[in-house]
Amino acid sequence: MDNLELKGKWNEIKGKVKQAYADLTDDDLTYQEGQEDEMLGKIQNKTGKTRDEVINWLRSL
């Protein structure tokens, strides 16, 4: 995933993610540069999606 693409639109994407999965918390969706894998892992655990599914889903938002 392109870090700049994610970073630039993250607040917008985060809102859409929270609408789709209300059990994801702000802590789960905290974007910190260099810790994208940890955040993706949290999203994977709560949604039941694979890493690739999560990345493709986030790109589509």
Image (cartoon, grey):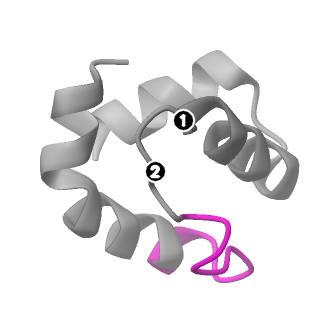
Q: Distance from label 2 to label 1 (Cα)?
A: 7 Å
Task: Out of 28 and 49, give the one closest to the viewer.
Answer: 28
In the rendered structure, find residue 14 and report the number of the disc placed on it: none
Task: Label 2, secondary structure: give it.
Answer: loop
Q: Which residue is the site of mark 1?
A: 36
Residue 46, given in percent of the width and then of the height, sits at: 82, 58
Q: How many marks?
A: 2
Q: Which residue is the site of mark 2?
A: 32
Q: Name the chief secondary structure element in magenta.
A: loop
**In the rendered view, does 34 fall on the left or right side of 59?**
right
**In the rendered view, does 24 fall on the left or right side of 17?**
right
Where is residue 22, by image quadrant? bottom right
| Amino acid found under the numbered disc labelled 1 | Glu
Q: Residues within 10 Å of mark 1 (few under 14, many from 20)?
A: some
Residue 54, given in percent of the width and then of the height, sits at: 58, 33
Where is residue 51, by image quadrant? top right
Residue 56, given in percent of the width and then of the height, sits at: 44, 24
Residue 2, given in percent of the width and then of the height, sits at: 27, 19
Q: Which span of residues is magenta-colored?
A: 19-29
Determine whether 12 is above or below 52 in the image: below
**In the rendered view, does 46 fall on the left or right side of 32?**
right
Task: Label 1, secondary structure: give it.
Answer: helix
Q: Nearer the viewer's eye, disc 2 or disc 1?
A: 2
| Amino acid found under the numbered disc labelled 2 | Gln
Q: Residues within 10 Å of mark 2 (few under 14, many from 20)?
A: few
Q: Magenta span has 55?
A: no
Task: Out of 50 and 6, give the one closest to the viewer.
Answer: 6
Quadrant location of the N terminus in the rendered image: top left
**In the rendered view, does 60 fall on the left or right side of 9?**
right
Residue at (47%, 79%) from the top-left corner?
A: 19
Determine whether 38 is above or below 28 in the image: above
Residue at (53%, 70%) from the top-left corner?
A: 20
